[in-house]
Image: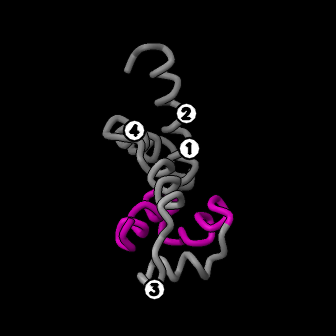
Amino acid sequence: MTSAELATAGESLYGSQWRTPLSKVLNVGTRIIRYWERGERRIPEAIAARIRQLADIGPIGLIIRSSIRRAAPELSRFQSHRTAVQVLADLSAAGII
């Protein structure tokens, strides 16, 4: 994972103040997040996979998340993302997608 990919995923999940929430989810310090962001340290593959898993909701998920953001702008980006993940899971379980 590149530092640009990290920043894109972090911002997609948590908005402009993504470093602290992502560090909490990954159980690492914010300092290591900043090292990764600046490219000073390599992001371990297991961590990169976890970040990708958190951020990757596919094109249908992106549409759902966008709709949630428009319908409920008071929700944080992460709350919108988490809701979109749940909607995707429910639709998949119902055999709709």
Residue situated in front as seen by the camera: 79 or 91: 91
Disc 4 marks a residue whose amino acid type is Gly
- Asked if marks 2 and 1 touch (Cβ < 8 Å), the reply is yes
Disc 1 marks a residue whose amino acid type is Arg
Disc 2 marks a residue whose amino acid type is Gln
Disc 3 marks a residue whose amino acid type is Glu
Q: Which residues are magenta?
A: 1-27
Residue, disc 1 = 82
Residue, disc 4 = 61
Q: Is residue 51 magenta?
A: no
Please determine whether, in this image, residue 11 is positioned above or below residue 52: below
Which is closer to the viewer, label 1 or label 3? Answer: 3
How much space separates mark 1 and mark 4, taking CA atoms? Answer: 10 Å
Give the quadrant of the N terminus: bottom left
Residue, disc 2 = 86
How much space separates mark 3 and mark 2, taking CA atoms? Answer: 35 Å
Q: Residue at x 41, y 47 (%)?
A: 56
- The secondary element bearing badge 4 is classed as helix
How much space separates mark 2 and mark 1, taking CA atoms? Answer: 6 Å
Residue, disc 3 = 40
